[in-house]
Amino acid sequence: MCSSDLYRKVSRICLLWALPLLVLAHPAVETQIGDLSRAIVRTPDSPALYLRRGLLHAQHGDRELARQDFEAAQVLKDSADVQIALGNLYFSEDDPVRAGEHFAQAIQMAGESPSAWLGQAKTAAALGANELALLSYRTYFQLADNPQPGYLAAAVRDIAPYDRQAAITLLNDALERLGPVPTLTKLADKLKQVP
């Protein structure tokens, strides 16, 4: 058997092994969306069902259906979760102004929501509202039970160009709380090198 025959056999085996995974790549999400659609038919006045289905649509990449579900949930009962979902949707569509409006509304509704503060921080940074970004990132860090190092690294990168000392303070606070997370320690080393 020559090497090209062996290659073809191995390729076929790999393809046969991977085919079920390819076929089942999205049905779980589609099944969940179908289940939620049936539940909405039975209980059309449940904002939680619309919100959950909208989140699945957003994860699946169908932003228009996500927006429709989020807005339906908002009509039924506006909540911080709905505002955060809309904010994340608009932010993913590169509309930080509209996203920021929704995150600000979420903060008014639930000032203790780390997700709302994180969303506001990201939109403020995107808009160049540096002081608001710093305040929002600090608040997120204080409120989150398990603040994500990647978000904190992004915060430090956003803040460092205009307020290096505030970025170093935020980074030191994060290292103290989270320990020596590689992403953050590398960033600390980088900040020490740059005057």
Image (cartoon, helix red, strand yellow):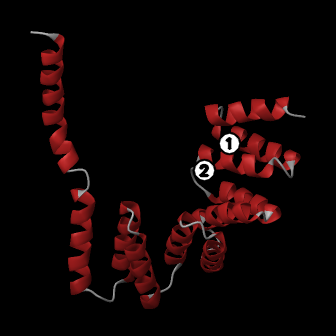
Residue corresponding to mark 2 = 147
In this orientation, does residue 51 appear? Answer: no
Under mark 2, the amino acid is Pro
Provide residue 43's location: percent of width, then percent of height: 26, 86
The quarter holding residue 38 reads bottom left
Q: CA distance from mark 1 to mark 2?
A: 9 Å
Please indicate whether residue 63 sits to the left or right of residue 39 in the image: right
Query: Which type of secondary structure does the marked residue at label 2 adopt?
Result: loop
Seen at 63% across and 79% down, the residue is: 105
The quarter holding residue 37 reads bottom left
Under mark 1, the amino acid is Arg
Residue corresponding to mark 1 = 177
Name the N-terminal-most of marks 1 and 2: 2
Which of the two marks, 1 or 2, is nearer to us in this view?
Answer: 2
**Does 26 sit above or below residue 5?**
below
Please indicate whether residue 74 sits to the left or right of residue 111 in the image: left
Evaluate if marks 1 and 2 touch, with contact meaning CB atoms under 8 Å apart.
yes
The quarter in which the N terminus is drawn is: top left
Provide residue 156's location: percent of width, then percent of height: 74, 47
Provide residue 79's location: percent of width, then percent of height: 51, 80
In this orientation, does residue 35 appear? Answer: yes
Seen at 36% across and 78% down, the residue is: 50
